[in-house]
Structure formats: C-alpha cells, structure tokens
Image (spheres, rainbow, N blue to C red):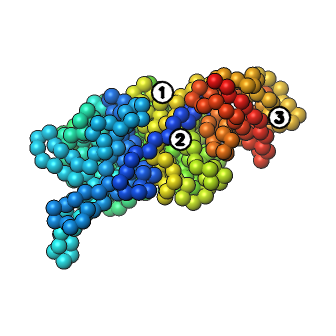
Amino acid sequence: MRNLLLTLLVAFCTVSVASAQTAWNHAATWNPTVTVSGQQSQGHGIAVDAEGKIWYQPYYASETTQPAWSATPVNTRALYIFNPDGSPASFSPLLYIDYVAGGRDTLGGRTILNATGAKAFDPHTGRGLRADENGDIIVMQYHHLYRLDHKTGQGKNMLIWENGQSGAAPAVATGNGTIFVAPVVPATGRALKMYDKDFQPLGNALDMTRGFSRSFEVSPDANKIYWSGYTNHGVILYERADEFSAFDSTGIVIPGVDTESLTWQPGTGWLWVSSGSANDGPNRLPGVTTNWAVDTWYAFDPAELAVNTVPAAKAMLTWVPRPECAADRTAANCGRPRGLAFSPDGQTAYATTFAVNGEPAIQVFSAMPVAIEKIDASVPDRFVLMPAYPNPFNPTTNINFMLNETGHARLAVYDMTGREVAVLADQTMSAGTYQYSFDATGLTSGVYVYRLTFGGQVANGRLTLVK
C-alpha cells in the first residue's frame, strides 16, 4: 500500500468553484416523539428507503423495554420512521426486530450475565443506517448488523460483526449489493470487511483502517472506497481494478474535511461529505489551504476528484443551528454533522446532527436551482452589497454584489430571530460584479436579512417575502 504521507509533501492544486450551484433551503424540522426525555437530538444515522420513507437512528436510548427478568423497565434504542410528509409510519417506533423466519431481537440491546452472574441489559448504541440496492435498510447497532424490510420493518438478516467492537455506518455497493463494514477505532486485527447480499463474508477490503471514523462510502461497483477517518483531515480514496484485486490507496482526494458523514445523491451521482464541526473543525490538513465552512455538507463529482487537488464543490447544504449556536458556530455542544440522506428523486435532503441537547432530530432541505452569474468582469474599486430587486418579492429576487479582489465570499439568509435559513454561496470568487437569483419557495412570508461576508468585511440587506 502506498504511503499516504507522500501526498502531503506535494503542493495541492486548487480548482476554482463552478459558477452554477444548487442551493438547499431549510424547509422543515422533524422530531420523533420519544419516551426518554431529551434524547431525540442524538442523531447518528439517517436513510431513505425505496418508498421514500425516512429512517432515523439516535445514538442513545430513547425508549424503554421491560425484560422478563427485571422488576423495572430499562432504557433501549429505537428506530423512527417518517412518511415523506413528516407523519410517523405505521410501524414507528421500531424497538424490536421480528424476523420473517421467526424469532425476535431487541434492537437496542441484549440480556447478558454480568460479573456476578446476574442478568443485565447490554445496550447497543446506534451507529448508522444505509439503504441497500433494493431500498431495504441496513442497520449498524453497535456490533450487530441488520437488514430490515422497508415495507414492514421485519428483519431479513442479522450478523454479529465483530463481537465487542463497535462498527461505523456501513456502506453498500448498490450495483452488486456488497456490504462494507468497518470499525470506528482502527487497531491491529480490525479490518474493513465485505459481505454479500446474504451477509456471507467476502474477505477483507482493508486489513486495517486509518483514523477514527464514523462513516465512509463505496462506489456502486464496489471498486472504490471513500474513507473518511476524520482524524486524517481529508477523504482518502482506495481503488481496485476488479472484485478479484486488492484495494490500494491513491491518496487524499478531498483535503481539509473532518468528515463524519458521506452519502450519494440520486440523479446527480454526486458524493456528499460533511466538512467538520466545532469539535473537529475543517481546514486542518497540514500544508493545504482550504475554506470549508463548519456544519456544512459539500457535493462533489467523483469523476473530478484527484489526488493533490482541492476539488470544486457542486453544491452545499448547511445545518441551521439553534439561535445560541448561530451566533457562534464554533461553540461546544452545537452538534456534529452525522447523517445525510436524499429522497429517491434527489430533490429533498434529510440531515441529522449529533448534539448534546436542543437541536432537532431531522432538518429537511429542498433543492432550489440557482445561478451565480458574473455580470461584469471589471474590477470594482470597493466591496459593495446592493439592494435586492424586486423587494418585496414572491418567490424570487436578485441579489447583486461587487468584489474588489479575489477572496472567499459567503452569502447567507437569516430570519428575524437570527436563525440561518439558507446559505446561497460559500466559495472563493474572483473580483467582479455578480448577480444571484434567490428562490425562497421553501420559506414562509416575512422579513429576512441577507448577509455577505468577504475578507473580514460584512454587509447586510433586508428582504420581504410576501406570499
């Protein structure tokens, strides 16, 4: 295997960000009704099945169960399933796995004998969700791997992956159904393993992983692994020629991200990766300058990813924090982007974050096609944010601004409570005059503030949306 450190000794090239992107606007917030108070914000997994239902997995216990041997209920984990309109599915919450062939498991743990020989409940924390090639749901619950029928929630397969070792969110090669499972913490003997559709072992993809990881992804043909071990400060690409060959690392292809969630977007085929959080911030790969924003997912075309290159983002989506976190995104306990999934048509995104408390379980975003157009290439003598027009508007308006030098520009929209409701641009831009067409279809009527930040300068404008 090649030495990845060699890639850090080579100067990274920067690809300019494309002028056309897709903006994702916050459309709704969903929270499940839980029995254990305060545990709905501990998001750890999210997936969308073949019917468009949204599956949500908290990390900690959110429900209770009553073992026959216990005088009192014990706390356990559950899965929550939403219909596309946000209502709970008929079999939500899911606390138990009833198998098609008979038998039952408690999803959030099992009965064991403790050191004294007494019965005790061994909890299984939520570790991640994926949809497989048929739209069924693959669940990693600590070291248990399940496949659930997306129509009924019944269990089809179960595997105790590595007893005593916690697994990261699994990855599924949708072209052939190969399932990849990896440890959260790398160590000798802890491999990234492959399984077929029936959970039968296919051997090791990697004998040992690199870096502490919550998530990774694989290509549909199972011949590329996008390894996110976020303590590596970048996404590493491993490739093989075919299913009979060994994987080898090519190097870091998305530098500067401390990624805790990755997923594919239907339709575009783009790979979405989270940038980092207040706990593990982005832009920390030594020797490489990047400007990824905190609590943001970025989309990349896998065909454009290359070693020693900072890739151009095709689109971006930013978690909308509660007000105290909006004021300071680097504050502790303001969440870690932990899961992202898309509707089957790729036009709705569902995000979750792992927060100590206070954040919603799921934020729903809608795709709004927009264009940032450079309408004048001449260099202005100053930085200017112009009044939006028309204003009041319904539902689109134009926002123009002038940049007097090349630099990183961020254009965002806030409601009157200070909550960020849309990030319109967050990228490096050259000097010139730009026009942005903003579509506010997903927002309610009211007054909003749009803010442009550039080179330490900040300018604000006001918008009035009338529907």
Closer to us: 215 or 208: 215
Disc 2 is placed on an element classified as strand
Which residue, given by chain and number where applicable, does mark 1 sit on? 347
Type of amino acid at the residue the image marks with label 1: Gln
Residue 118 point in image, percent of width and height: 17, 73
Q: Residue at x 46, y 41 (%)?
A: 30
Pointer 1 or 2: first along the chain:
2
Query: Would residue 239 be visible to someone looking at this image?
Result: no
Pointer 2 or 3: first along the chain:
2
Residue 270, which numbered label? none
Q: Which quarter of the picture shows residue 93?
A: top left
Q: Residue at x 29, y 36 (%)?
A: 90
Can you say which quadrant of the picture contains the C terminus?
Answer: top right
Residue 282 point in image, percent of width and height: 58, 51
Task: Tell me how far mark 1 sits from mark 2, CA to CA.
Answer: 15 Å
- Residue 236, relative to residue 121: is it above or below? above
Residue 384, which numbered label? 3
